[in-house]
Image (spheres, helix red, strand yellow):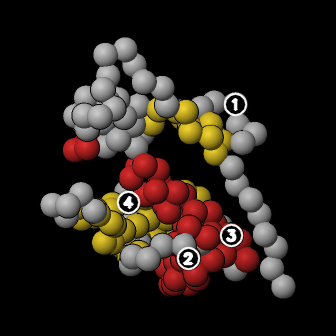
């Protein structure tokens, strides 16, 4: 048995004066994303290599952050199940995007690099091994067609 959930997002883009949407170099890539039941729209653009505004979020940033965030929440969940007290969690995630000369592209790999601080030395090995279980529970990771590596470190306080 499974339960289905629906998520909704609205994308809003409007041409600016002087833009020409027939020319891929001149139109603005800036737009807003409004998520259902959220009050603050995200200001989004293309990534800088694709003529976007580098100061705004881009779809590639959002995919990587969704993976890192989902993994963290799954990890905290499995740690709680095993009575491991997590004191802090940071991640310096990276993703490699390959773009062909045709413009087609895809992510080839994501590297999550979580550094987790736990309470108690006795659970250190278990805490490190739980990243694999967390990955198998992560909805976002389960939806990806590229490898997700975990270069995890566990510290004890």
Name the residue that disc number 1 marks: 39
Is disc 3 surrounded by few (<14), some (14 to 19) or many (20+) residues within 10 Å? some
Does label 4 or label 1 sit earlier along the sequence? 1
Does label 2 or label 4 sit earlier along the sequence? 4
Name the residue that disc number 2 marks: 142
Residue 102 lies left or right of residue 149; in this view the side is left
Name the residue that disc number 4 marks: 93
Distance of label 3 from label 2 (alpha carbons) = 17 Å
Q: Which of 80 and 95 is in front in this view?
A: 95
Q: Give the x, y percent position of residue 152.
A: 41, 72
Does label 4 or label 3 sit earlier along the sequence? 3
Does label 3 or label 1 sit earlier along the sequence? 1
Secondary structure category for the residue under label 3: helix
Circle 4 or circle 3, nearest the eye:
4
Does label 1 or label 2 sit earlier along the sequence? 1
Q: Is residue 96 above or below residue 48?
A: below
Distance of label 3 from label 1 (alpha carbons) = 27 Å
Give yes or no for contact between labels 1 and 2 (Cβ–Cβ under 8 Å).
no
Is disc 2 surrounded by few (<14), some (14 to 19) or many (20+) residues within 10 Å? few
Q: Which of 128 and 146 is in front in this view?
A: 146
Q: Residue at image x 58%, y 63%?
A: 70
Q: Give the x, y percent position of residue 18.
A: 31, 16
Secondary structure category for the residue under label 1: loop
Name the residue that disc number 3 marks: 77
């Amino acid at each position: 048995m499974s339960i289905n959930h629906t998520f909704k997002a609205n994308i809003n883009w409007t041409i600016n004066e002087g833009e020409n949407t027939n020319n891929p170099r001149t139109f603005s890539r800036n737009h807003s994303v409004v998520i259902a039941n959220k009050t603050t729209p995200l200001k989004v653009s293309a990534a800088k290599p694709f003529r976007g505004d580098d100061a705004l979020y881009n779809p590639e940033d959002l995919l990587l952050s969704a993976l890192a965030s989902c993994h963290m929440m799954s990890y905290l969940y499995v740690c709680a199940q095993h009575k491991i007290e997590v004191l802090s969690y940071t991640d310096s995630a990276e993703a490699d995007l390959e773009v062909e000369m045709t413009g087609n592209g895809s992510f080839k790999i994501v590297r999550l690099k979580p550094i987790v601080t736990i309470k108690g030395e006795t659970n250190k090995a278990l805490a490190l091994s739980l990243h694999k279980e967390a990955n198998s529970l992560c909805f976002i990771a389960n939806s990806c067609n590229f490898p997700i590596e975990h270069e995890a470190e566990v510290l004890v306080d």
